[in-house]
Image (spheres, helix red, strand yellow):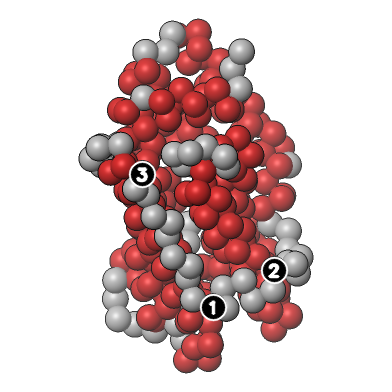
Amino acid sequence: MLSAKSLFQEILANDESFALFCSIAASGESQGGWENARIAALVPESERGLAPKITRHGADEDKHGRIFNALMKKRGLDPVPVPPETDYTMLLEKNGIGLAHEQLGRDERLAVQDIVTYLSHSRVTEQRASEQMDLLRKHFADDPDIGRAVKQISDDEDNHLAYCHEELLRFAYAGHGRAIQRTLRECALAEIRIYRDVSLAVMANMGRILGWSKAKSAVLAAGIHAVYAYERLGGWRRMVSLKMPERRDALGGPASAAPEFA
C-alpha cells in the first residue's frame, strides 16, 4: 500500500534517488540563503532593525543546504544536477513571485513595499516548508541517518513561519494590510500551481530512477492532482491567514549550528 512514509523510504533507500532528493533540497535552500542575504543588505533605512532577522533567515537556509550536502557526503555521494523542472525556487522567481534576482543583484535600497512582498512570499513558502518537514519529522525523527537533520530543519522552518506572521502583522498594523492580503493571495495561488508542477516533475524523475510501473506513477500523479484540486478550491487560504505566533521574536538570536554527521 502506498503511503507517504513508504514512498520516502523507497527514495531514501536508493543512492541515486537519495542524491537527487538531497541535491534538489540543497539547491533550493542555497538559493534562499542568497536571496535573504541580499535582502538584508538592501533593507531600507526605515527597516534596518529587521536586517539581523533577515540575515538569520538566510543563515538558516545556507545551513540547511550544508546539511543536505553532508547527508550525501556521509553516504559517499556527490551532488547531482537539478533538473530545471524540479527547481521550485527558480520557478517561483520566473513566475514573478517574491523579489526578482535581477533586482536583488543591484546595489539599490529596497522600498518598504519590497519588504512586504518578501515577507508575504516567505509566509507562503515557509508554510509549505514547515508542513513538509513536519511530515518528515513525523516519520523519520528517530531515523539514525537523517533524524537529527530532519528535526533541526523542521525547528528552523517553524521559526521562519512564526517570524513571517509576526512581521507581517506589524506591517499590517502600520497600514499595509490591504497590500499584504493582496500579495499573499497572489503568491499562494501561484505557489500551489508551481508546487503541483514541481511535484509531478520530481515524481517522474524518481519513477525513472526507481523503475516504478506506469500504474504506480499514475496513482502518485493522481494524488498530486488531488492535492492541487483541494488547494485550489480553498486549501490555499491556510497560506494567507495571519495570527500572532506563540514563538515571538523567533529569529531574534544567532542561527543554531548544523548537526555533525560522522
Q: Earlier in the sequence, mark 1 or mark 2?
A: 2
Establish if 213 lies above or below 200: above
Residue tagged 1: 253
**Along the line of sight, which residue is nearer the eye, 69 or 93?**
69
Which of discs 2 and 3 lies nearer the camera? The answer is 3
Establish if 83 lies above or below 134: above
Is residue 221 among the parts visible in the rendering? yes
Tag 3: residue type?
A: Leu
- Residue at the (42%, 30%) spot, across then down: 12
Q: Which residue lies furthest to the front in this view?
A: 262
Q: Which mark is residue 160?
A: none
- Residue at the (68%, 57%) spot, across then down: 240
In percent of width and height, residue 74 lies at 31, 42
Q: In this view, does 225 lie to the left or right of 257?
A: right
- Residue at the (38%, 81%) spot, across then down: 41
Establish if 51 lies above or below 27: below
Is residue 24 among the parts visible in the rendering? no
Element marked by disc 2: loop
Tag 1: residue type?
A: Gly
Residue tagged 3: 71
What is the quadrant of the N terminus in the image?
Answer: top right
Q: Earlier in the sequence, mark 2 or mark 3?
A: 3
Element marked by disc 3: helix
In percent of width and height, residue 235 lies at 71, 42
State yes or no: discs 2 and 3 in contact (Cβ < 8 Å).
no
**Along the line of sight, which residue is nearer the eye, 88 or 148?**
148
- Residue at the (48%, 39%) spot, across then down: 144
Q: In this view, does 227 lie to the left or right of 112?
A: right
In percent of width and height, residue 161 lies at 62, 61
Measure the C-alpha gap from mark 1 to mark 3: 26 Å
Residue tagged 2: 247
